Image (cartoon, helix red, strand yellow):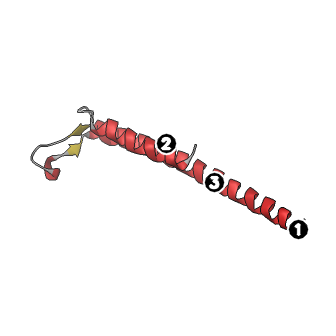
Amino acid sequence: MQKGAIKDLVYGGLEEIINNPNYYYKSTVGLGYSKFNEEGKIAILEFMDLMAYKITEAESADLDLRAKKQVIDQLKQKD
């Protein structure tokens, strides 16, 4: 999965959790009164565990792709 797709998933996933009143209370008074309840905290942690793994996968794939490109570029220069 590409980094841009992961960014969209993180934003979209957080937005969905925040918009669910079973997980997050958004106060009209302000930030100090808005909060995640216990279920929301668990949902956020589980979601971020999954996204963290996806990010590490994307980083690894990106590193692999760059390494392969460097090898190919070096081989082309030797011709």
Q: Which residue is depicted at the point 17% across and 51% down?
A: 31
Comes first in the chain, label 1 or label 3: 3
Residue sitting at the far bottom: 78
Q: Can you give x and y, in whole percent of width and height, for residue 65 in the image?
A: 69, 54
Which residue in the protein does label 3 denote? 62
Q: Nearer the viewer, residue 50 or 18?
A: 18
Residue 67 versus residue 8 in the image, above or below = below
Front: mark 1 or 3: 1
Is 36 situated left or right of 73 in this image? Answer: left
Looking at the rendered structure, the secondary structure element under dot 1 is: helix
Q: Which kind of residue does numbered mark 3 sit on?
A: Asp
Q: Which kind of residue does numbered mark 2 sit on?
A: Leu
Is 44 situated left or right of 63 in this image? Answer: left
Q: Which quadrant of the figure has residue 42?
A: top left
Q: Which kind of residue does numbered mark 1 sit on?
A: Lys
Q: Quadrant of the C terminus?
A: bottom right
Q: Can you give x and y, in whole percent of width and height, for residue 53 in the image?
A: 54, 46
Q: Which residue is depicted at the point 21% across and 45% down?
A: 35
| Disc 3: CA contacts within 10 A as few (<14), some (14-19) or many (>=20) | some
Q: Can you give x and y, in whole percent of width and height, for residue 75 in the image?
A: 85, 63
Is 68 situated left or right of 2 in this image? Answer: right
Looking at the rendered structure, the secondary structure element under dot 3 is: helix
Residue sitting at the far left: 29
Q: Quadrant of the N terminus?
A: top right
Which residue in the protein does label 1 denote? 78
Tell me, for residue 50, which label it has, or none: 2
Q: Can you give x and y, in whole percent of width and height, for residue 34 in the image?
A: 18, 46
Q: How far apart in space, not on screen, are marks 1 and 3 (Cα)? A: 25 Å
Q: How far apart in space, not on screen, are marks 2 and 1 (Cα)? A: 43 Å
